[in-house]
Amino acid sequence: PTCERYAVRRLPFARLEDGDVAFFERLMPGRVVTGEEEVKAFNVDWLKSVRGCSQLVLKPQTTAEVSQVLRYCHEKNLAVNPQGGNTGLVGGSVPVFDEIILSTALMNKIISFDKVSGILVCQAGCVLERLNEYLEEQGFVMPLDLGAKGSCHIGGNVATNAGGLRLLRYGSLRGTVLGLEVVLADGSALDCLTSLRKDNTGYDLKQLFIGSEGTLGVITAVSILCPQKPKAVNVAFLGCQSFAKVLETFTTCRAMLGEILSAYEFMDEKCMELVERHLKLSRPVTGSPFYVLIETSGSNSTHDEEKLSNFLEQAMASGLVTDGTVATDDKKIKELWSLRERITEALTHEGYVYKYDISLPVGKLYDLVTDMRARLGHSAKSVVGYGHLGDGNLHLNITAESYSHSLLDAIEPFVYEWTAGCSGSISAEHGLGFKKKQFIQYSKPQQAVVLMQQFKAMLDPKGILNPYKTLPSAPKRSLC
Ligand code: FAD
Ligand code: MLT
Ligand code: ZN
């Protein structure tokens, strides 16, 4: 259980009483979950690596209900864990102890979509894939995409500042999110749900909540700028004989594909072996130590295909790429994307997964995998590297039959020291959650951490929102 593995103590929050449950039953009849079996799935994270022991899940439908829940919890000193699709990978989405789970599962209404501006306004619990389907019918797409799209909620995406597979093209949520509605710890609703491309009136408060992992407020609605659905999409899946060639291929494809390049993902041979073995996916290309998935998105298929084939010709002729396949139809495109998107799932079949999500100077991206492999030797089952190469984001994953303290000690803090040594980030896109909060100092100076703790204390003075997550506990000294 979480509490033993991470040696953390329960803070002195109130314990749930029958009267509390009765209050919530009156507030949202039929949307209060209490049975041990029914609550179970909400207590365990997607990776099945951490587990809480909450006895209560609340499923509000409106912002007003979220306000009432938080006002009550604030008054009674009850801790709350906001939860979206529960696909988070750092243990932030499930309680550590008995925090009440506030699920956005029923906050799934689209509020408006403006076809001229491409601005979508929706409740926080809308599932990313459903939003994308809705937009596609109108000739638009969501500006982000990730392997967890079928389950993750847009509120969870914003709360984690999820990156994903389209960031290279459409940028981060810090640019595409135009407005947010957030309920603060005391139950007051903050309406920053504007739909303006430009707004320089004072501080941009929504940025504070993007990536705050449920520790500063509950996001209840999101306004987001969506791009036009590209008319022509192509995917190339290529094999490279070395990581140096992966990098050179990236430089060449950026130069030759220019504005139509929409994704540049990489994975090593071991990843491909695992998706084949565990998920029975067939591999279109074999025999290379590295593979890249390149996507182009544009508005003119003839133009895009010509550009792509010129690039491929050059990449093959110069020996950057030794083998490959290209897809232009939807079905094959999806199949090729599955090889990359489903690595996360394939890894879980190996046993316990130690997950690291690192930002590094792109030239050094794979050195960490090589060094870790040499360091761990046979104590790990596999050490693999894949990720969003175009964003300088490595996913280093280490697997073992089961969790072991000694293996964790061999990985951490080495992995964080290595990353800090390259001025990288110990969390590129997954956040810090419960598992990584004590390592924040490898990527942020003490002064920044103290300022973060002060923001937290100002917005949530009782610390009821997602306690034990994201920030190291209580400020040790003040800034002034
Ligand atoms: P949850 O997991 O439920 O919660 C995540 C965090 O956000 C928690 O701290 C929670 O308290 C908080 N939270 C959730 N909803 C709210 C809210 N409404 N208000 C305030 N706080 C809230 N991540 C990436 O960045 N890029 C990827 O490519 C990517 N791919 C993934 C692929 C797979 C197969 C899986 C399982 C995960 C992947 N992730 C990825 C991680 C995860 O999907 C993202 O972090 C996602 O954005 C989480 O959304 P969620 O709704 O599941 O949030
Ligand atoms: C991905 O890019 O596949 C996700 O971030 C999930 C992971 O790191 O496994
Ligand atoms: Zn990722």
Image (cartoon, grey):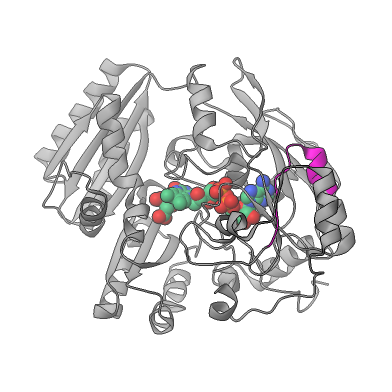
Task: Tell me which residue sits at (12%, 39%) in the image.
Answer: 316
Is residue 163 visible to the viewer in this orientation of the structure? yes
Q: How far across and how far down the image is residue 122, in percent?
A: 66, 31
Q: Nearer the viewer, residue 318 or 439?
A: 439
Q: How far across and how far down the image is residue 398, in percent?
A: 34, 68
User: Magenta part of the protein: which range?
Assistant: 55-68
Q: How far across and how far down the image is residue 395, in percent?
A: 39, 58
Task: Tell me which residue sits at (38%, 80%) in the image.
Answer: 407
Quadrant position of residue 432: bottom right
Which quadrant of the rendered structure holds the N terminus? bottom right
Which quadrant of the rendered structure holds the C terminus? bottom right
Does the magenta portion include 275? no
Residue 140 versus residue 80 in the image, above or below = above
Q: Nearer the viewer, residue 314 or 191?
A: 191
| Residue 408 appears left or right of 3 | left
Quadrant position of residue 235: top left
Task: Tell me which residue sits at (66%, 44%) in the image.
Answer: 104
